[in-house]
Amino acid sequence: MNKNSFHLTTAQFAQLHNINKRTLHYYDSIGLFSPNTIGENGYRYYDLSQSIDFEYILMLKELNMSIEEIKNYIENPDPQKFISLSNTKELEINQQIKRLKNIKNVIQTKKKQIEICQELKEFKIEVTACKEEKLLVLPYDFYENDVSSVFSYMKNNWNIEQIRMGVGGIISTEKVIKNDFSKYDGIYTPALKQTPAKDIFLRPMGNYVCCYHRGTWDTLPLAYEKILSFTQNNKLKLTGFAYEIGLNDFTITDEKDYVTKIMIQVI
């Protein structure tokens, strides 16, 4: 093989690594990464053997290292420095993987909720056997209908990844039976997997009346009337709390299309 086969022009080297050749020109101008060889014609060429080093530069850039940090390391390479750098970046990668897994969980949950909403006409009620579920619960006074205060309250207690799981309200069955919705008992969100056990509120395993209601917030008492009628007709007793959560708030333009899921344990 001709030794010139190992020499690549800027355009060829850029194509090999799927980058813009202007990036190579820039890296050359700042002394970060330059062609190794000058040909007989006076042109500068990259050696094929430079590809591995260049991929390491791209890798460090993907790990959010600045050009200055990468340049400093390349100019002063050191085994211990690389080990220290690797340890730091490994921790950052693990944190990013954890964050992306949480985002994936949110997307999958929301997709399932939207699919339920698409199949729903106006109202649906059924008894479902439910597994124990881990929740985070905060007491909250809903006398004040101030959305900004609610969000600030949540952010002071939960991180944003937790809030993205969705937030609902809880109200005691005693208040539901009395048709008293003036003050809810709290707000809740499905707990992320890494949540400390001491912060967990367990929604018990058992049979639940599950109601899907399409309509604005002020029509929810009508849904509860139907739940009470359903449980009375089927000789079921409500116990614990009613758990409300919106399913499609991010996908609608008309509040009348808002779907709320209500769950109440029955015995």
Image (cartoon, rainbow, N blue to C red):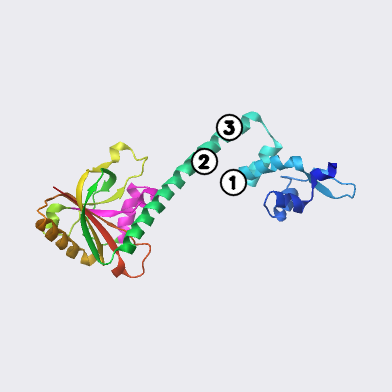
Cα separation between marks 1 and 2 = 11 Å
Residue 94 belongs to magenta span: no
Q: Which residue is mark 2?
A: 93
What amino acid type should be assigned to the residue bearing mark 3? Ser
* Percent of width and height locating residue 236: 11, 52
Residue occupying the point 71% across, 42% down = 51
Q: Are marks 1 and 2 in contact (CB under 8 Å)?
A: no
The residue type indicated by label 1 comes to Glu
Q: Would residue 65 appear left or right of 216 to someone viewing this image?
A: right
The residue range painted magenta reads: 147-171
Frontmost of labels 1 and 3 is 1
Nearer-the-camera pick, 47 or 178: 47
Disc 3 marks which residue?
84
Q: Which residue is mark 1?
A: 62
- The circle drawn on residue 172 is none
The secondary structure that most of the magenta stretch takes on is: helix
Look at the numbered discs 2 and 3 and tell me whether their residues touch, using CB distance below 8 Å.
Answer: no
Question: Along the line of sight, which residue is nearer the eye, 89 or 143?
Answer: 89
Q: Residue at x 66, y 38 (%)?
A: 73
Residue 23 in view of the camera: yes
Give residue 266's position: percent from left, percent from top.
15, 49
For the residue labelled by badge 3, is the local secondary structure a helix, a strand or a loop?
helix
Q: Is residue 27 left or right of residue 63?
A: right
- Is 144 displayed left or right of 100 in the figure? left
Q: Residue at x 28, y 45 (%)?
A: 135
